[in-house]
Image (tube, grey):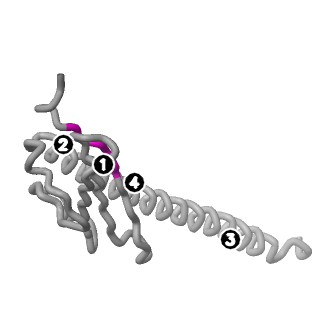
Amino acid sequence: MRKNRGFSLIELNCALFVVTAGIFGVLGTYQLVMDKTRALNEYALAERIVRNEIEFLRALPFAALEAAEAAPFRSQTPGLERLVNATPTLTILDRAETAPGLKEVRARLAWTGEKGRTIRYELVTLIADKGNAP
């Protein structure tokens, strides 16, 4: 009986160590999942904002699409305030020399994501003058 004295205390310490390590592992995984979910939600919001701007420009008359370099978005953009340091940039290039009645539209959104890194989402499309269609 005397030989086993203190053995239960060692077993208890080992069990507490295993349980504590498991709890810290679960908490670390939970934090990682929450960070990635937040990043995915930000990216989805940015995609929705940029697509909204492109659709707004498609609804305008072709003549209203004046060539612009690094201009702000023209539409009222809901949700933009939810992105940290969001910088929307719109570039419209006239492609008349290569394709008459065609403009290239580039909508770009940059914001500060987790841990201070800059994230960018960009969408490029062509908009044609539907008034010149045969």
Q: Mark 3 points at which residue?
A: 17
The amino acid type found where label 3 is placed reads Phe
Give the mark toward the camera: 4 or 3: 4
87 left or right of 19?
Answer: left
Q: Name the residue under label 4.
A: 40
**Residue 126 in magenta stretch:** yes
Residue 10, percent across and down? 77, 74
CA–CA distance in space, label 2 to label 3: 57 Å
Give the mark toward the camera: 1 or 3: 1
Q: Name the residue under label 1.
A: 97
Q: Up-down: is 38 above or below 1?
A: above
Identify which residue is drawn at 41% across, 77% down: 116
Give the mark toward the camera: 2 or 3: 2
CA–CA distance in space, label 4 to label 3: 35 Å
Assign a secondary structure to mark 2: helix
Q: Mark 1 and 4 residues: CB-CB less than 8 Å, in contact?
A: no
CA–CA distance in space, label 4 to label 2: 22 Å
Question: Circle 3: is it few (<14), some (14-19), or many (20+) Cα within 10 Å?
Answer: few
Q: In which quarter of the image is the C terminus?
A: top left
CA–CA distance in space, label 1 to label 3: 72 Å
The residue sitting at the top extreme is 134
What numbered label is drawn on residue 132?
none
Q: Name the residue under label 2.
A: 55
Residue 35, percent across and down? 43, 63
The amino acid type found where label 4 is placed reads Leu
The amino acid type found where label 1 is placed reads Glu
Residue 17 image-quadrant placement:
bottom right
* Dominant SS in magenta: strand
26 left or right of 91?
Answer: right
**Which comes sooner in the sequence, label 2 or label 1?**
2
Q: Which of 28 and 114 is in front in this view?
A: 114
